[in-house]
Image: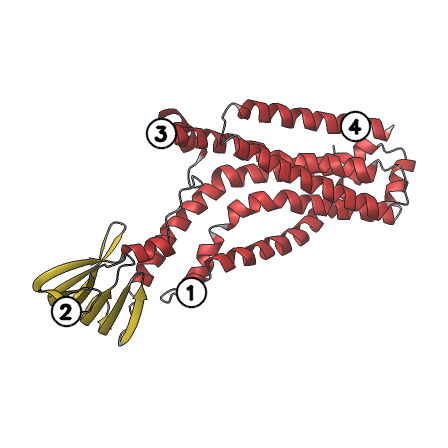
């Protein structure tokens, strides 16, 4: 079924892709690591746990990067065929431009299928693990960020802890100063306290302590003793580890169910747009394959190899970015979803017709 030329080009394309993609994915992985590096600096998070957290984001990023990796690989292989005169030999031996494009297009369809799998199954599953792992990290950090025998800055509060063992805190001092003008300052002291987590809230449960209120002049307003007092430190974590509002974790079936039954209209529109964008985003590799065929296989001037390669990469990247913008526009207006399908289909047809004309 597959000719020798088909297998030869496909083999070179596969080897090049698996050489290029790890480098680009690693660079993107480093960029993602910088965003979450604060988790290690917070304390209580090991490097291994941090690496697991970053790896959970990788499938979603690979779905965006792989079409560009394929474009770069196809350009390298086709440019190499032209430089080594192998492309000329193939065409002189009776091979058509379409037969040379067929292995590139075939591999592009394979990458499109891989991207669709990552977008519809791999990325949602990984993102669920990401949220679960982030919750565990938040809990681990919350039990370690209060350093013993030191003043800990938390929002508008200063907390001093005499000793810290697991979730138990001894000899605690809390000074709270509101940013509002003429606000009352609170000073809370307690012999014993503990860290308690209730849902998304992180609380300090104080026992046998004293609470003082002091005005801006330094005068004591009130002095109260208590047996038990709860102090909320959740705002610190809300600013540092805010829960994501994205719908990346939903599978295709969950997106479809939310698009039909969610009472919030905005959520329904976002789910429907995300459902179709995952499908349409995979066609970028097919577009890139045809662009490589137009600029490098059917080049008018054989001496302009490097310029044609640059043009092919530029056009492929621009088309990829435009496709992402087109898909994102559907989140604001679901009526554009059908329009997106029509535009993408017509654009692929236009590119293929243009390729057919250039080969003749």
Q: CA distance from mark 1 to mark 4?
A: 52 Å
Q: Earlier in the sequence, mark 2 or mark 1?
A: 1
* Mark 2 Cα shell of 10 Å, populated few (<14), some (14-19), many (≥20): many
In this view, the residue in front, 221 or 338, is 221
Front tag of 4 and 3: 3
Left or right: residue 262 versus residue 37 is left
Q: Is residue 26 left or right of residue 8?
A: left
Q: Nearer the viewer, mark 1 or mark 3?
A: 3
Q: Does label 2 or label 3 sit earlier along the sequence?
A: 2
Mark 1 vs mark 3: which is more N-terminal?
Answer: 1
> How many neighbours does mark 4 have within 10 angstroms: few (below 14), some (14-19), or many (20 or more)?
some
User: Mark 4 — residue?
Assistant: 354
Query: According to the image, label 2 marks what residue?
Result: 190
**Which of disc 3 and disc 4 is earlier in sequence?**
3
Q: CA distance from mark 4 to mark 3?
A: 45 Å
Give the SS element for disc 2.
Answer: strand
Mark 1 sits on what residue? 40
Q: Which residue is mark 3?
A: 264
Residue 153 figure quarter: bottom left
């Amino acid at each position: 079924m597959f000719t020798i030329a088909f297998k030869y080009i496909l083999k070179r394309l596969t080897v090049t892709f698996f050489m290029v993609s790890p480098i680009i994915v690693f660079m993107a992985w480093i960029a993602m690591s910088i965003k979450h590096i604060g988790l290690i600096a917070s304390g209580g998070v090991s490097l291994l746990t941090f690496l697991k957290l970053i790896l959970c984001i990788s499938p979603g990023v690979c779905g965006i990067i792989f079409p560009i990796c394929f474009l770069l690989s196809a350009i390298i292989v086709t440019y190499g065929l032209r430089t080594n005169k192998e492309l000329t030999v193939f065409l002189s031996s009776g091979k058509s431009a379409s037969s040379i494009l067929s292995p590139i297009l075939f591999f592009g369809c394979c990458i499109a299928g891989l991207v669709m799998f990552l977008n519809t199954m791999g990325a949602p599953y990984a993102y669920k693990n990401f949220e679960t792992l982030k919750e565990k990290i938040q809990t681990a950090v919350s039990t370690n960020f209060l350093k013993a025998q030191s003043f800990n800055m938390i929002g508008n509060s200063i907390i001093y802890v005499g000793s810290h063992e697991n979730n138990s805190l001894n000899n605690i001092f809390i000074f709270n100063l509101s940013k509002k003008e003429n606000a009352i300052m609170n000073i809370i002291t307690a012999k014993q306290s503990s860290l308690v987590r209730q849902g998304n809230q992180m609380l300090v449960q104080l026992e046998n302590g004293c609470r003082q209120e002091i005005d801006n002049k330094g005068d004591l307003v009130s002095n109260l003793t208590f047996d038990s007092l709860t102090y909320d430190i959740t705002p610190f974590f809300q600013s540092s580890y805010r829960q994501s509002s994205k719908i990346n974790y939903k599978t295709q079936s969950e997106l479809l169910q939310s698009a039909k039954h969610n009472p919030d209209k905005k959520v329904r529109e976002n789910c429907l747009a995300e459902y179709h964008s995952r499908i349409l985003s995979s066609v970028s590799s097919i577009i890139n394959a045809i662009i490589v065929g137009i600029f490098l296989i059917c080049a008018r001037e054989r001496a302009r190899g490097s310029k044609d390669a640059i043009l092919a990469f530029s056009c492929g990247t621009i088309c990829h970015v435009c496709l992402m913008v087109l898909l994102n526009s559907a989140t604001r207006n679901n009526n554009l979803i059908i329009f997106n399908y029509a535009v993408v289909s017509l654009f692929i047809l236009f590119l293929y017709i243009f390729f057919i004309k250039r080969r003749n």
